[in-house]
Amino acid sequence: MAKTLTEQAQQESLHPKFIRDEDERPKVAYNDFSVEIPVISLAGIDEPGALRDEVCRKIVAACEDWGIFQVIDHGVDAKLITEMICLARGFFDLPPEEKLRYDMSGGKKGGFIVSSHLQGETVQDWREIVTYFSYPMRARDYSRWPEKPEGWRAVTEGYSEQLMNLACKLLEVLSEAMGLEKDALSKACVDMDQKVVVNFYPKCPQPDLTLGLKRHTDPGTITLLLQDQVGGLQATRDGGQTWITVQPIEGAFVVNLGDHGHYLSNGRFKNADHQAVVNSNCSRLSIATFQNPSPDATVYPLKIRYGDKPILEEPITYSEMYKRKMGNDLEHARLKKLAKDHTQKTQAELAEDEVKNINTKLLPVNVKISKGMEEILA
């Protein structure tokens, strides 16, 4: 199989590695947009008063309801956003051999890969990614940051800084809503980690059979997603029974809470259940910026409201939480595959028995089959 999706996108059918089980396939089109996800203007959030109170109320309500919303008037430099998108597109337009210079398979931290960096995935996602770690700053490994297109490092450093500031501002709102000091959620991350993942979803020959990114919740604290105008991000809040496609808005960021934020709030704030679908008409680009706690940060509710019980039995580290989550996901996929293989085998055996029964019923009792007839039936 090709190491990039460039060749795959030109073919008429999908490689079996990308084909999802029927229950995992898209139910709603990439461009069947919904307006259910709240769009919140952050204008006035920095000034105390009635306007800020109303903005905060909307943010909290969105987190309690969906765990996902969009923000506009967020203060991130529009020119920086445009440059970031242009650089990202430029990277994925590079020849395969140039992208593969940053191949991150084999455990490398940051770089380029097809589908996912997780080992053991039974079905691959229809996407290419380039990812790098930007915070804490001492963890930056510029050898894993693309050198092309020119200007990548300077633009992405500025972009990462502004998104870190925006994420912390949103976490302050949620901290205050929990009755805590405004920096409580940020402090719970200890030394906040930031990872940027640039997703490229090429045109897909059979988009109804696969996903760009499988259904999941983010493990971290809060995620900010910048997406182009194509569409493909989907969310559910009823366990996957119904899905909606998030309406792209020029210059907006989609905000969703992860598992860590969910646990810190003792389940009050939802961890957004989402996926990405693809299409056969055009490629799609998105840039996800994940704000995560440090590996040794404690995962446990910061405040438990009167009458509630903690949703975790005991405090654990974020590193342990992440390992359990990834392990459970892989184990679930493995068991599902085993069940599918067993069902297919059983059905094949039943079909074979049925054929034998039919053949037996076609033969008159006590009729001896001649050698010639045996050869015909064979």
Image (tube, rainbow, N blue to C red):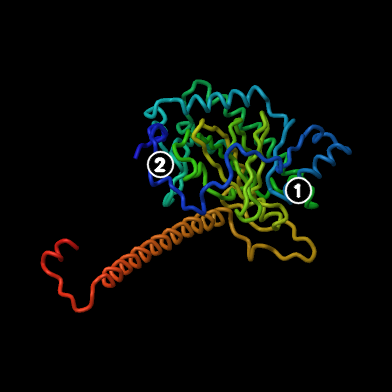
Q: Is residue 334 above or below residue 282?
A: below
Snapshot quadrant of residue 160: top right
In the image, taking residue 240 as reference, residue 95 lies left or right, namely: left
In the image, taking residue 203 as reference, residue 188 lies left or right, namely: right
In the image, taking residue 189 as reference, residue 130 lies left or right, namely: left
In the image, residue 281 lies at what x, y percent? 51, 31
Snapshot quadrant of residue 157: top right
Q: Is residue 358 above or below residue 32?
A: below
Residue position for label 2:
14
Residue at position x 33%, y 66% in the image = 349
Residue position for label 1:
175
Q: Which-is-in-front pick, marks 1 and 2?
A: 2
Q: Which quadrant is the N terminus positioned in?
A: top left
Residue type of the residue flagged with mark 2: Leu
**Depth check, front residue: 243 or 330:** 243
In the image, residue 81 lies at what x, y percent? 63, 26
**Depth check, front residue: 251 or 349:** 349
Residue at position x 74%, y 57% in the image = 303
In the image, residue 362 lies at what x, y percent? 27, 70
In the image, residue 90 lies at what x, y percent? 49, 24
Instruction: Residue lying at the far bottom in this picture: please name it.
Output: 366
